[in-house]
Amino acid sequence: MFNTRVKVKDLLATSPEGQDVIVMGWVRTFRNNQFVALNDGSTNNNLQVVMELGAYDDAFLKRITTGASLKVKGKLVASLGKGQAVEVKAESVEILGDCNPEKYPLQLKNRPSLEYLREIAHLRFRTNTFGAVFRVRHMLAFAIHKFFHEKGFLYLHTPIVTASDAEGAGEMFRVTTLPFDNPPRKEDGNIDFREDFFGRATNLTVSGQLEGELGAMAFSEVYTFGPTFRAENSNTARHLAEFWMIEPEMAFYDLEDNMNLAEEFIRTIIRFAMDHSREDLDFLAQRLVEEEKQRPQAERSEMGLIEKLEFVVNNRFERISYTEAIEILLHSPAYKKKKFQYDVSWGIDMQSEHERYLVEKHFKRPVIVTGYPKHIKAFYMRQNEDGKTVAAMDILAPGIGEIVGGSQREERLDKLEARMKEMHIPTEEMWWYLDTRRFGTVPHAGFGLGFERMVQFVTGMTNIRDVIAFPRAPKSAEF
RNA sequence: UCCUCCUUAGCUCAGUUGGUUAGAGCAUCUGACUGUUAAUCAGAGGGUCGUUGGUUCAAGUCCAACAGGGGGAGCCA
């Protein structure tokens, strides 16, 4: 019976002919004991419900407070007021849930800060900003599945709990059922994980890539899209301990195929969000304009949010080699004026300041950098003929830095094993991974994309904790 | 983890060279008004100044430690 209701978004797009409607939602504001701005999360726009003066007693009217939930039956009519095209003339109003205004922490007229809203993350979805952010997040997630599905990729669910093999992607969260106070120990004093639930040490996954490669060796093209965990003590606006990552892995792809896919992927999902979440993106763009007004002129961005997204959708990404990137940095005015804090030379792992210079100052667009020195990259990346570099590619985006990291994988067993030994990665434990190179190996490639960074880029939100529903970060796991 | 800044009413913020009873706007409450659009108008209540310790005749104000948060860096997605 609740499903006889019509969503606010649909009502606002309906031509008013006095038809009977049922609408439910939460009160945003209540003016003049007559006008309820009702919101149900389907859009940031509120539906105006008009309650006839004198038709309700005072005690009832006092219960219609910001945050209270209502069921309204009435007629959809053309609005007499100027702020909206349609409104509902109420015939009955039922309060589904009261909301004590003296205790309700979300009084929207107070313009609460993002930091405050983070402390009430269970309620922040009811704000326009977070309403828009999470609808856009949803639209991007949907676009991602749509993109890969239409290309014939198989959605592979890689495990959340993994054995502690050397994947080398960062600090891990341990998964165990052993007692903390007195765990079983081996003779040498170390904890005996043979006694643990899985009979070995296990952790939360830091990447689904290796398992993704196994899938690609049968299905040709797969992708994973799931939660990923890093126990790094990172306190920044672009790191989380729990985040969502998209990792496609493709057989019969070389590095160029990989770049082409990554670029098409990014462009396609942004286009999709612009086509299907335009209202929310316009709202977020306006929010950014207001935010920028608080900043000094020099720190303001050159492009608005919509312009920036249009630009990315309509322009090719710049593609340069690592060696060219170093050359550009060495010949840059910033380098000559000693503006960089960290020195530049071939072989360095580029710092944030270097990446930002390339993306934001030199090219002013997303940049794909390829051919990194092998000593700063992972063991599984395909070694180039020069003996110094690997077939890696990073996509750097304005404002957030590295958004994609990928490579063509080393498919040659001898080269891969030699590299693993050099990097002290135990080949015995990785027998299952090496089997793909033993039995019908093929050239293949893939990349990883941090979903929250993508959402940041599209929504313009500067703190990653504001684009995930319940952020997990050092010293922070409320809700 | 490092550097730096911040923490005053429910929220956003003022608070002078340390000085008597800590302020504003909004929110909330009471009343007025009633086609409003962040409604408007009048009035009221609301504070252990993050915590602990120190300096001083006197601390919101100075010092230290700790906690939480912002910005930047490292690690990375």
Image: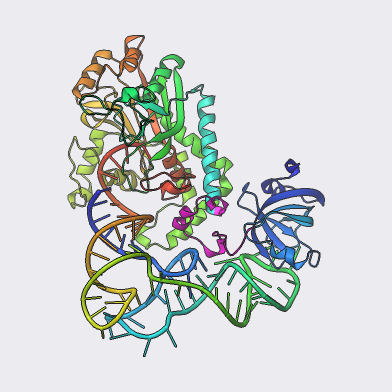
Furthest toward the front, the residue is A182
**Above or below, A41 relative to A418:** below
Q: Is residue A107 magenta?
A: yes
Is residue A385 shown to the viewer in this render?
no
In the rendered view, does A375 fall on the left or right side of B14? left
Q: Is residue A247 magenta?
A: no
Place of residue B46 in the rendered image (x, y in percent of width and height, measured from the top left): 51, 73
Furthest toward the top, the residue is A439
Place of residue A310 in the rendered image (x, y in percent of width and height, measured from the top left): 48, 44
Q: Residue at x 54, y 40 (%)?
A: A138
Give A303 or A195, whichever is nearer the viewer.
A195
Give A201 or B17, whichever is nearer the viewer.
A201
Give A198 or A296, whichever is nearer the viewer.
A198
What stretch of residues is rendered in magenta?
A99-128
**Above or below, A208 relative to A96:** above
In the rendered view, does A316 fall on the left or right side of A342? right
Place of residue A298 in the rendered image (x, y in percent of width and height, measured from the top left): 35, 60
Split into 4 quadrants, where in the image is the N terminus of chain A? top right
In the rendered view, does A126 fall on the left or right side of A253? right
Is residue A119 shown to the viewer in this render?
yes
Place of residue A406 in the rendered image (x, y in percent of width and height, measured from the top left): 35, 29
